[in-house]
Image (spheres, helix red, strand yellow):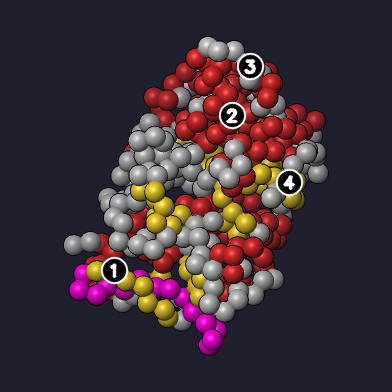
């Protein structure tokens, strides 16, 4: 029997967050748990890492600058932690670039890859083998403690479970998942968790009547946990998202929760699409509020286009007609294309114990 249907039969309707946790991360049947890779041309969605090594090369430039800030403050090493590392391709691309371009930084790096999927974890040794002798590689399902360096999360928060709420004439209600004759359906019930309303209140935005919205308690908890894990250094988050005023407005009246399968998004039949990715846009205001409350200092927020161009994307391209040159230009276009990854992915940086340095990737950008 479907584990979701079985749970509902035992307990009654469950929140969308509980449903997503099972659908995405169930140890046997979960979407992410059962495969080492879900993105790319043959997958269900596309990420910046799938474009090629260019994204990792530019991120490496930002990491090198962060090391300079920490070194000036007395740090002797740099611990790079990638949360939601997937099969390890981004870490590989970053390490390849640092080793080739900044061997001085490479010598002080150690890396931890954090990933919940056993299948993805199993790929780390193979993909990162060239760096195994010089970099301490640790694969884990949880963040390490006392990090001096940087935590990087690329499209992690939008893959975390969310509660779905609707503002009705009688106040805020929550969408739950029930089962009718073995078929999953939505039902509107009272809030499953008081923290949902508390997190909304902290954004200072009131959801208009009739508007459907997602509330990322799991994402907020992760930000708080990551803030505690960071002893000194930086946190950089890449994700789809909006400020609360836009996210919880009539412009997104149907919410942003969608199911991706075969690069096709379905926001209507997300309960009936079978094995697929479930994702919702991130509340950037909530992320910032939780980070600040947890002791972090905001250092910038920009569209991915501005982040990558500020780090020297153009200088890595040429106008040659060879295959490598053409591929490089196509990759750059994909990473910064308006309406695509360039404008829909937002990059947020936070610091702890490093003051307020003007980081290169955030020097000339903004959030659109």
Cα separation between marks 1 and 2:
42 Å
Query: In the picture provided, is 287 more to the left or to the right than 86?
Result: right
In primary-sequence order, the first of circles 1 and 2 is 1
Q: Is residue 174 magenta?
A: yes
Query: N-terminal of the two: label 1 or label 4?
Result: 1
In 3D space, how far apart are the residues under numbered discs 2 and 3 (Cα atoms)? 11 Å
Q: 246 left or right of 179?
A: right
Would you say residue 286 sits in the magenta stretch? no
Total marks drawn?
4
Q: Which residue is mark 1?
A: 184
Q: In the displayed image of the protein, which residue is found farthest to the bottom?
A: 170
Q: Main secondary structure of the magenta part?
A: strand
Q: Secondary structure at mark 1?
A: strand
Residue under the image location 51 percent in, 48 percent down: 156
In this rendering, does residue 47 appear at all?
yes
Q: Nearer the viewer, residue 262 or 10?
A: 262
Disc nearest the viewer among 1 and 2: 2
Segment colored magenta: 167-182
Q: Residue at x 30, y 44 (%)?
A: 34
Name the residue carrying label 4.
Answer: 366
Image coordinates of residue 188 in percent, x first then y, are 41, 79
Q: Residue at x 18, y 62 (%)?
A: 1
Q: Confirm or deny contact between disc 3 and disc 4 (CB under 8 A).
A: no
Task: Quickly name the residue at label 2.
Answer: 332
Residue 223 at x, y percent in the picture: 60, 54
> Residues under labels 1 and 4: Cα distance?
41 Å
């Amino acid at each position: 029997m479907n584990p979701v249907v079985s749970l509902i039969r035992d307990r009654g309707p469950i929140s969308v967050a509980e449903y997503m946790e099972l659908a995405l991360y169930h140890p046997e049947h979960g979407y992410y748990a059962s495969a080492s890779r879900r993105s790319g041309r043959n997958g269900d969605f596309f990420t910046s890492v799938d474009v090629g090594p260019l994204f990792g090369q530019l991120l490496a430039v930002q990491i090198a600058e962060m090391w300079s800030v920490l070194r000036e403050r007395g740090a002797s090493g740099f611990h790079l932690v990638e949360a939601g590392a997937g099969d390890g391709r981004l870490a590989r691309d970053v390490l390849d670039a640092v080793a080739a371009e900044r061997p001085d930084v490479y010598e002080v790096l150690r890396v931890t890859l954090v990933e919940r999927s056993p299948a993805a974890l199993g790929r780390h040794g193979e993909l990162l083998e060239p760096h195994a002798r010089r970099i301490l590689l640790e694969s884990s399902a949880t963040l390490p403690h006392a990090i001096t360096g940087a935590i990087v999360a690329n499209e992690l928060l939008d893959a975390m479970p969310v509660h779905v709420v609707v503002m009705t004439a009688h106040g805020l209600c929550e969408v739950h998942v029930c089962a009718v004759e073995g078929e999953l359906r939505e039902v509107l019930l009272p809030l499953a968790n008081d923290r949902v309303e508390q997190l909304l209140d902290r954004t200072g935005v009131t959801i208009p009547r009739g508007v459907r919205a997602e509330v990322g308690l799991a994402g907020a908890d992760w930000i708080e946990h990551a803030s505690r894990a960071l002893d000194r250094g930086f946190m950089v988050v890449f994700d789809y998202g909006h400020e609360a005023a836009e996210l919880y407005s009539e412009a997104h009246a149907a919410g942003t929760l969608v199911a991706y399968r075969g690069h096709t998004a379905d926001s209507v039949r997300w309960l009936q699409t079978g094995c697929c990715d479930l994702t919702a846009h991130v509340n950037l205001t909530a992320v910032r509020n939780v980070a600040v409350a947890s002791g972090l200092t905001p250092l910038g927020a920009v569209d991915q286009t501005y982040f990558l161009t500020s780090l020297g994307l153009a200088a890595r391209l040429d106008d040659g007609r060879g295959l490598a040159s053409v591929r490089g230009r196509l990759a750059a276009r994909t990473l910064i294309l308006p309406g695509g990854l360039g404008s829909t992915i937002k990059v947020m940086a936070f610091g702890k114990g490093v003051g307020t340095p003007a980081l290169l990737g955030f020097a000339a950008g903004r959030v659109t």
